[in-house]
Image: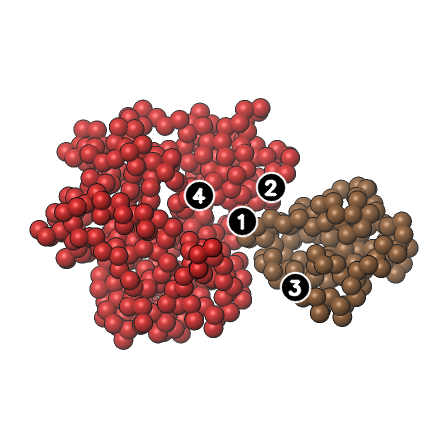
């Protein structure tokens, strides 16, 4: 599992080559507060690193989540449409946002591991 | 940047884990560890304790007594201040010469004076305006803390600390004795709930707040939930829903201007902006503040533009998620020909037009003890 400075986590799927699941960290979810709405990208969308791909609205404000890498959105967590609070309850599990297929898994190398991220926050 | 001020309850916020943010020149708690949503719900089901010490407290005295002070204040406000009985409070507006709302406030008639509670961001300007406009009166800024206690558990909690609270009705004011000195209490608030606002000596404020927090069901609530609570209650935030350009009529605050100050009334007009305000009452304003209910789950916040077909017909002034109505809610200004209840409009959100319906206010009925 890798972590970005924007408080996103990236977890390579074990059974799907070059597919990475993306969500936000516990720290980010706590900072955002109670999340009441998540707008997800369409499956099949091709995105470029740093594109805004997800909008999350907390009680307080709207925030954008960026694509951490180039790739194609292959699946989104549609459970969040009905139950956006999953992001607060289980940010590293049931609160994931999307799965993205990347060309080159070495794009993940620049990100922090868990120990480095813990130091970062 | 000027240094932020702190209220007498700063130490308590810190001890309770409040997340502090700048607001109207003060360092104020936006939320505590349980978060905005739970604080909001706790206020509606138990009671919320809010530090509102940043707000302005002003005493107005006239050498001939409070009747004379009331008559003088009517020169600046379109309310019936003269008719306000001792021990009662009323919502009021300070208007500019263009009929715009310079501030909204509460005015209480006490035995010796008029007591005003005004918005934090406007208190300096209000003091100057009152001193300038009421030269025969003594206008004093009162340096006390102010605590709001709101929700169904508020009555029992305050009664346990200051006997007599339970006998008060909505918009009554009284001075109650307590272990924390005399409390200037009004039965009112900014949440749509039954509750109280309590003015206390600054050095007694933390003791009083802790004593109230010790009562059943009382939780500390920050500015985040204060905003969602007042939005569900359909109450205006000055600087956002009303300002120096909006008239009371377009702000849908006509209920606050009694017949006696309207055309044909015994004391019609005689306040700043009367020409515009009275004409809008007789005719119609060009736009109106309305409730707005987005159909989808996406909140529509301040600044979202509203359309009917290709025509831009308005803008959202306050919006967000209503934790008790469990739905996005908003208020905004809409051209008068599109302001009818049930009118379907579209709000532009991130480049897309999403349906939103004009609806009545409040979103949640108030539970005042009348």
Color of chain B here? red
Query: Which residue does the image show at 42% across and 50% down from the upper left?
Result: B230
Tell me the element at label 3: helix
How far is the residue under mark 1 from the one under mark 4? 17 Å
Chain of the residue where label 3 is placed in the rendered structure = A
How far is the residue under mark 3 from the one under mark 4? 31 Å
Q: Nearer the viewer, residue A115 or B216?
A: A115
Label 4 crowding class (10 Å Cα cut-off): few <14, some 14-19, many 20+? few
Color of chain A here? brown
The reply to the same-chain question for discs 2 and 3 is no
Q: Are marks 1 and 4 in contact (CB under 8 Å)?
A: no
Residue A115 image point, x, y percent: 76, 70
Tell me the element at label 2: loop
The reply to the same-chain question for discs 1 and 3 is no
Query: Which residue does the image show at 79% across and 60% down from the upper left?
Result: A111
Which mark identifies residue A27?
A: 3
Chain of the residue where label 2 is placed in the rendered structure = B
Residue B337 image point, x, y percent: 44, 25
Which mark identifies residue B240?
A: 4
How far is the residue under mark 1 from the one under mark 3? 22 Å
Query: Which residue does the image show at 83% across and 45% down from the upper left?
Result: A72
Q: Are marks 2 and 3 in contact (CB under 8 Å)?
A: no
Residue tagged 2: B296
């Amino acid at each position: 599992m890798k972590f970005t400075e924007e408080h996103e986590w990236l977890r390579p799927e074990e059974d799907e080559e070059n597919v990475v699941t993306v969500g936000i960290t516990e720290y980010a979810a706590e900072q955002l507060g109670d999340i009441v709405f998540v707008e997800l990208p369409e499956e099949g969308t091709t995105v470029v690193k740093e594109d805004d791909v997800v909008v999350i609205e907390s009680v307080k404000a709207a925030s954008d989540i960026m694509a951490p890498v180039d790739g194609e959105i292959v699946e989104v967590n549609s459970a969040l449409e009905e139950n956006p609070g999953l992001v607060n309850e289980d940010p590293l599990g049931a609160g994931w946002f999307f799965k993205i297929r990347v060309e080159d898994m070495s794009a993940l190398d620049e990100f922090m591991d868990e120990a480095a991220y813990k130091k970062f926050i | 940047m000027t240094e932020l001020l702190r209220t007498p309850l700063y130490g308590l916020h810190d001890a309770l884990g409040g997340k502090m943010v700048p607001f109207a020149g003060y360092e104020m708690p936006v939320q505590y560890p349980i978060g905005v949503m739970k604080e909001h719900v706790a206020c509606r089901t138990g009671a919320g304790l809010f530090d509102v010490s940043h707000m302005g407290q002003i005493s107005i005295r006239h050498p001939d007594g409070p009747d004379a002070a009331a008559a003088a204040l009517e020169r600046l406000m379109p309310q019936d201040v003269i008719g306000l009985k001792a021990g009662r409070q009323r919502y009021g507006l300070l208007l500019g010469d263009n009929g715009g709302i310079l501030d909204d406030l509460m005015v209480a008639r006490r035995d010796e004076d008029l007591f005003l509670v005004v918005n934090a961001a406007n208190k300096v300007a209000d003091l100057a305006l009152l001193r300038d406009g009421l030269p025969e009166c003594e206008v004093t800024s009162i340096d006390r803390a102010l605590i709001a206690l709101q929700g169904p558990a508020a009555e029992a909690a305050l009664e346990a600390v200051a006997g007599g609270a339970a006998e008060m009705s909505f918009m009554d004011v009284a001075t109650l004795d307590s272990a924390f000195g005399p409390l200037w209490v009004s039965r009112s608030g900014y949440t749509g709930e039954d509750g109280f606002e309590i003015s206390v000596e600054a050095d007694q404020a933390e003791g009083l707040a802790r004593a109230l927090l010790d009562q059943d069901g009382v939780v500390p609530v920050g500015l985040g939930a204060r905003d969602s609570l007042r939005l569900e209650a359909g109450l205006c935030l000055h600087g956002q829903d009303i300002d120096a350009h909006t008239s009371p009529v377009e702000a849908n605050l006509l209920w606050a201007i009694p017949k006696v100050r309207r055309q044909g009334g015994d004391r019609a007009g005689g306040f700043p902006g009367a020409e515009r305000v009275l004409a809008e009452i007789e005719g119609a304003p060009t736009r109106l503040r309305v409730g707005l209910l987005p159909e989808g789950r996406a909140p529509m916040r301040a600044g979202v533009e509203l359309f009917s077909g290709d025509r831009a017909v308005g803008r959202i002034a306050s919006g967000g998620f209503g934790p008790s109505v469990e739905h996005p809610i908003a208020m905004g200004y809409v051209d008068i020909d599109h302001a009818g209840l049930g009118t379907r409009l579209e709000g532009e959100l991130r480049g897309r037009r999403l349906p939103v319906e004009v609806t009545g206010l409040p979103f949640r009925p108030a539970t005042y003890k009348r």
